[in-house]
Image: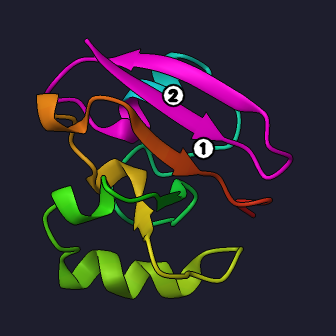
Amino acid sequence: MITIHLVAADGATTTLQGKPGFSLMETAVHANAKGIEADCGGLLTCATCHVIVREPFLSQLPPAADDEIAMLDFTATPAQPGSRLSCQIHLTDALEGLTVDLPASQH
């Protein structure tokens, strides 16, 4: 299992355990974690699973594909360096301790 830390805008941290191969979004939704809405269920059509990935984890992820980059234009909170859609982050053992910041709003 991979430990993941979701840090809300108010600083509250939720710690989850995820399985390799699953997306960060799937893991958060399965755990009923607040802050990742995932309205489209991971189909890359809504941008309501926006997270800001902290280093050193951001540099361990593959680059965002063009469709993810385009969808980041539609996030409720403006995208910033480190912004990714959690449906596109697939958990691996290298992401142990993954820490992401959650935007104040997904809508």
Q: Nearer the viewer, residue 102 or 85?
A: 102
Q: Residue at x 31, y 56 (%)?
A: 56
Residue 51, x across and y down, in percent: 52, 57
Q: Residue at 44% x, 58% y: name it.
A: 53
Q: Is residue 97 left or right of residue 39?
A: left
- Residue 24 lies in the magenta-colored region: yes
Q: Do the residues bearing badges 2 and 1 touch, measured as CB atoms within 8 Å?
A: yes
Residue under label 1: 36
Residue 46 seen anywhere in this rendered image of the structure: yes
Q: Residue at x 56, y 81 (%)?
A: 79
Q: Is residue 38 above or below residue 63?
A: above
Residue 55 belongs to magenta span: no
Q: Which mark is residue 11?
A: none
Q: Which of the numbered marks, if any, corresponds to residue 29?
A: 2
For this view, does 66 lie left or right of residue 71? Answer: left
With 56 as the anchor, is 54 left or right in this view?
A: right
- Please provide the residue range marked out in magenta: 1-26
Residue 64 on image: x %, y %: 23, 74
Residue at the extreme front: 56
Mark positioned earlier in the residue sequence (2 or 1)? 2
Q: CA distance from mark 2 to mark 1?
A: 7 Å
Label 2 SS: helix
Asked whether 107 or 3 is in front, the reply is 3
Give the quadrant of the N terminus: top left
Is 59 left, or right, of 84 in this rendering?
left
